[in-house]
């Protein structure tokens, strides 16, 4: 199948943009911390590495998020790269606040960063900078610690968000 030429000045309505953006698969991370004695977190599919020196990563969060204003007050944030089997955990992180961490094994650092015990990679970070960008805010995080699982075959495949659904990569034969 071949696409035709692009036409400028198209109606770029949100549904059309969401469908186009959804063709690009992305990994999913949990961003979490202990805030005022409560586990607080969200899922983000916009995670990316930014810089090695200084060590920076980023994710985007909707300006309408009710969770981000609380999370951003934390001294440190935990960021966990979710594994293929974390689809239900990811849906929970997007659901009712009171149940986001039900039956999820987590570890809290002394600084309040919360990471999921079974994540593929776990980062301890602080907010480095926030950049308003349309209806989202790009959050740039400075890394202070990192831990990764060794490659364990299919058990260490990442959770993938693609076309508004969750999936996983397949290993080459």
Image (tube, rainbow, N blue to C red):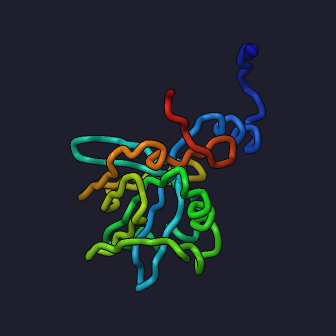
Identify the image quadrant of residue 167.
top right
Residue 48, given in percent of the width and then of the height, sits at: 43, 43
Q: Nearer the viewer, residue 141 or 85?
A: 85
Residue 164, given in percent of the width and then of the height, sits at: 69, 47
Residue 63, given in percent of the width and then of the height, sits at: 57, 60
Q: In this orientation, does residue 64 appear?
A: no
Q: Residue at x 30, y 41 (%)?
A: 51
Q: Residue at x 53, y 75 (%)?
A: 103
Q: Residue furthest bottom?
A: 37
- In the rendered view, does 163 fall on the left or right side of 61? right
Q: Is residue 119 above or below residue 170?
A: below
Total numbered circles? 0
Q: Residue at x 54, y 58 (%)?
A: 86
Q: Nearer the viewer, residue 98 or 70?
A: 98
Q: In this orientation, does residue 12 appear?
A: yes
Q: Residue at x 45, y 82 (%)?
A: 38
Residue 155, given in percent of the width and then of the height, sits at: 46, 49
- In the rendered view, does 22 fall on the left or right side of 127? right
Q: Nearer the viewer, residue 47 or 84?
A: 84
Q: Quadrant of the N terminus?
A: top right
């Amino acid at each position: 199948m071949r696409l035709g030429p692009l036409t400028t000045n198209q109606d770029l309505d949100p549904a059309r943009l969401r469908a186009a953006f959804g063709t690009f698969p992305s990994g999913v991370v949990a961003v979490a911390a202990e805030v005022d004695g409560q586990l607080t977190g969200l899922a983000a599919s916009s995670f990316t590495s930014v810089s090695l020196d200084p060590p920076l990563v980023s994710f985007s969060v909707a300006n309408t998020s009710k969770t981000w204003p609380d999370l951003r007050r934390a001294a440190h944030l935990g960021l966990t790269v979710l594994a293929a089997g974390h689809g239900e955990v990811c849906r929970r992180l997007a659901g009712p606040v009171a149940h986001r961490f039900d039956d999820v094994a987590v570890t809290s650092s002394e600084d309040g960063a919360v990471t999921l015990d079974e994540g593929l990679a776990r980062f301890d970070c602080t907010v480095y900078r926030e950049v308003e960008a349309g209806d989202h805010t790009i959050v740039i995080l400075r890394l202070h610690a990192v831990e990764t699982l060794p490659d364990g075959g299919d058990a260490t495949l990442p959770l993938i968000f693609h076309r508004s659904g969750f999936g996983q990569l397949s290993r080459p034969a």
